């Protein structure tokens, strides 16, 4: 292992974000306002259930109100959108999160786009995506925002660097590509149809792994001194990067778990507080 290797500790970054939120939540309390996040879970997917519980517990620890709405797997798109619209109209709800993925028969994009832009704290709507691309989203997608927060916290340079993003999902790969580009990185976005993927990765100063395949990124793909951010989370607490194989090459790397994940949740909480403050004109 590289003696100068920097382990990018997501728990440390998340703790800093939460510490900064405490005073803001207290200030809102003096005005009689409690930031509130509503989370919708459709069906009983075990991983999604775990994620929703983790987010609810994180809210509780910080003093953010959490509303959990469980809908049966057979819920229709229209029924889901009707639920979202009720939350849009609820003045005490500041953020709405629809847990991804939803059952296959639901039009997920239509559901995401029914979330009010002022409450889209997870940054999943088409409007939020567009604002993010232009660099002025109030609530960019949480995992991409977490990746950028880690780079900023550890003062890792982005401007002028070649970043390779592996994955092009509308809530991770594409928005983080835009965010890196807006910070003056040169960005290559790779995906399942990319030929000679390894060749692109070997030229990267920054590697973002968001492909959803365990241990996908191999050590001999990594340019010596590259920074690796693993946004994958697969069964068995395994990321998208072959962590041990990449250690000899990387200058900095996020572990899985305790890397990008905790910062993603902290970012969601931050966005919920941001939304509550915005409503109060703070």
Image: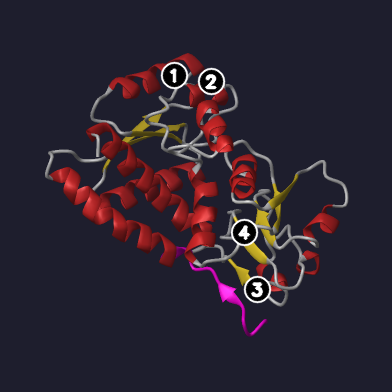
Give residue 158's mark: 4
Q: Secondary structure at mark 4?
A: loop
Q: Position of residue 46 (x, y in %)?
A: 49, 44
Q: Give the residue pinned by disc 2.
A: 110
Closest to the observer, 38 or 272? 272
Q: Circle 2: is it few (<14), some (14-19), or many (20+) Cα within 10 Å?
A: some
Q: Circle 3: is it few (<14), some (14-19), or many (20+) Cα within 10 Å?
A: many
Give residue 81's mark: 1
Closest to the observer, 161 or 49? 161
Q: Is residue 113 magenta?
A: no
Q: Is residue 81 visible?
A: yes
- Disc with the residue nearer the chain's start (1 vs 4): 1
Say left or right for 98 vs 253: left
Q: Quadrant of the N terminus?
A: bottom right
Magenta region, residue range: 1-11
Q: Position of residue 232 (x, y in %)?
A: 61, 53
Cα separation between marks 3 and 1 = 45 Å
**Residues at marks 1 and 2 touching, judged by CB atoms closer than 8 Å:** yes
Foreground mark, 3 or 1, reads: 3
Foreground mark, 3 or 2, reads: 3
The quarter holding residue 209 reads: bottom right
**Residues at marks 2 and 4 touching, judged by CB atoms closer than 8 Å:** no
Cα separation between marks 1 and 2 = 8 Å
- Disc with the residue nearer the chain's start (3 vs 4): 4
- Disc with the residue nearer the chain's start (2 vs 4): 2
Give residue 251's mark: 3
Q: Position of residue 159 (x, y in %)?
A: 63, 57
Q: Position of residue 113 (x, y in %)?
A: 50, 23
The quarter holding residue 225 reads: bottom right
Residue at screen point 26% across, 50% down: 60
């Amino acid at each position: 292992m590289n003696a100068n290797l920097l382990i990018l500790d997501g728990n440390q970054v998340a703790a800093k974000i939460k510490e900064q939120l405490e005073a803001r939540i207290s200030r809102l309390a003096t005005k009689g306002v409690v930031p509130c996040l509503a989370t919708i879970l459709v069906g009983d997917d075990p991983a999604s259930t775990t994620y929703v519980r983790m987010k609810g517990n994180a809210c509780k620890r910080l003093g953010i109100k959490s509303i959990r709405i469980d809908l049966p797997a057979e819920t229709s798109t229209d029924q889901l959108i009707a639920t979202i619209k009720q939350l849009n109209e609820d003045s005490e709800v500041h953020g709405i999160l629809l847990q991804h993925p939803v059952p296959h028969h639901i039009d997920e994009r239509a559901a995401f786009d029914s979330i009010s832009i002022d409450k889209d704290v997870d940054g999943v709507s088409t409007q939020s995506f567009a604002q993010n691309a232009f660099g002025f989203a109030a609530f960019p997608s949480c995992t991409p925002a977490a990746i950028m927060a880690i780079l900023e916290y550890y003062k890792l340079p982005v401007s002028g660097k070649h970043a390779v993003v592996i994955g092009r999902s509308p809530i991770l790969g594409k928005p983080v590509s835009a965010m890196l580009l807006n910070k003056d990185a040169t960005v290559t976005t790779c995906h399942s149809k990319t030929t000679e993927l390894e060749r692109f990765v070997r030229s990267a100063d920054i590697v973002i792994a968001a492909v959803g395949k365990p241990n996908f990124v191999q050590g001999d793909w990594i340019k010596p001194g590259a920074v690796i951010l693993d946004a994958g989370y697969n069964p068995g607490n395994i990321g998208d990067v072959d962590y041990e194989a990449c250690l000899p090459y990387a200058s900095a790397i996020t572990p899985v778990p305790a890397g990008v994940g905790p910062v993603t949740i902290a970012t969601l909480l931050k966005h919920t507080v941001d939304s509550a403050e915005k409503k109060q004109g703070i």
